[in-house]
Amino acid sequence: MKTRVSIINYSNTIPFTYGLLNSKDLQPLAEFSYGYPAQVAEMLCHNQVDVSIISVGAIPSIPNAHIISNYCISATNKVDSVLLCSNRPIDQIETIVLDYQSRTTNILVQILARYAWNVTPKFIMGTAGYETEANDFAKVIIGDRALNNASRFSYVYDLANEWNKTFHLPFVFAAWVANKQLSKEFIETFESACQYGITHIDDAIRSQQKTFSFNIHDYLYHSVEFNLNDEKRASIDLFFEKGNELGLF
């Protein structure tokens, strides 16, 4: 039986998607599906897939969840695609609309509100299209929607940079997680496929066969980091600690 792998359709996963789909060794071992972060986390939670790259904030909700890869989606400073966008400065924000597509970012902004900015806004959940609605709310926006909409706002706070300034650690947004034990053969083949993707970023971009409204090369080479090292694992632990302190899990 093939291992069911779910992939997120975001620009920051383009190298992974390219590596996985072009690995001849992995094809006999895996079948693929796609979704956005909240969807794939639900699929993993309900055993509809075996492996997915998911927001780290969803990990505690997945039975038997464990990180299987030394690759991830992370950033040390600015990531450019995980933002709090507002037409007011942070100390004047009264309401923050959360992003329905990412549990991690929603938890992150609440941690930052408490420990970095010392503000107590009201938090409400956004629905599809909220990032373009004409209102005075601050908005958490992630992924390609953040890259395409940030210029519409007067104040833009990069949440990876805000985390780094507060806790002096990089931030991990998503990791490859399984809900069951996988074979050594699969994990080694999977790792090789991921490595191939992130060492062939130009080829991965060309495989998309589309024009981006932002500088995709700069974003993938200079904003996103793909290695999951000990410092970043410590950051995940701190994220869980602070989130638990606030009852966000």
Image (cartoon, rainbow, N blue to C red):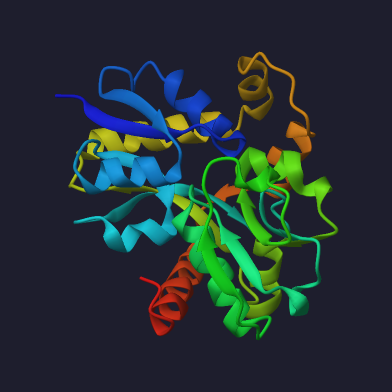
Q: Is residue 59 above or below residue 246?
A: above
Percent from the top left, x then y, of residue 220? 68, 39
Residue pictured at 69% horizontal, 16% vertical: 210
Q: Is residue 162 above or below residue 98?
A: below
Image quadrant containing the C terminus:
bottom left
Most extreme residue toward the front is 135
Q: Is residue 200 left or right of residue 30?
A: right
Residue pictured at 66% horizontal, 79% vertical: 166
Q: Is residue 98 left or right of residue 249?
A: right
Residue pictured at 20% horizontal, 56% vertical: 63
Percent from the top left, x then y, of residue 221? 72, 40
Most extreme residue toward the left is 1
Instruction: Determine which quarter of the picture holds residue 64.
Output: bottom left
Percent from the top left, x then y, of residue 225? 62, 49
Image quadrant containing the N terminus:
top left
Q: Nearer the viewer, residue 223 or 93?
A: 93
Q: Is residue 44 above or below residue 13?
A: below
Q: Is residue 44 left or right of residue 227?
A: left
Count of residue discs: 0
Residue pictured at 68% horizontal, 62% vertical: 137
Percent from the top left, x then y, of residue 60? 30, 63
Q: Nearer the viewer, residue 92 or 34?
A: 92
Q: Is residue 217 left or right of residue 82?
A: right
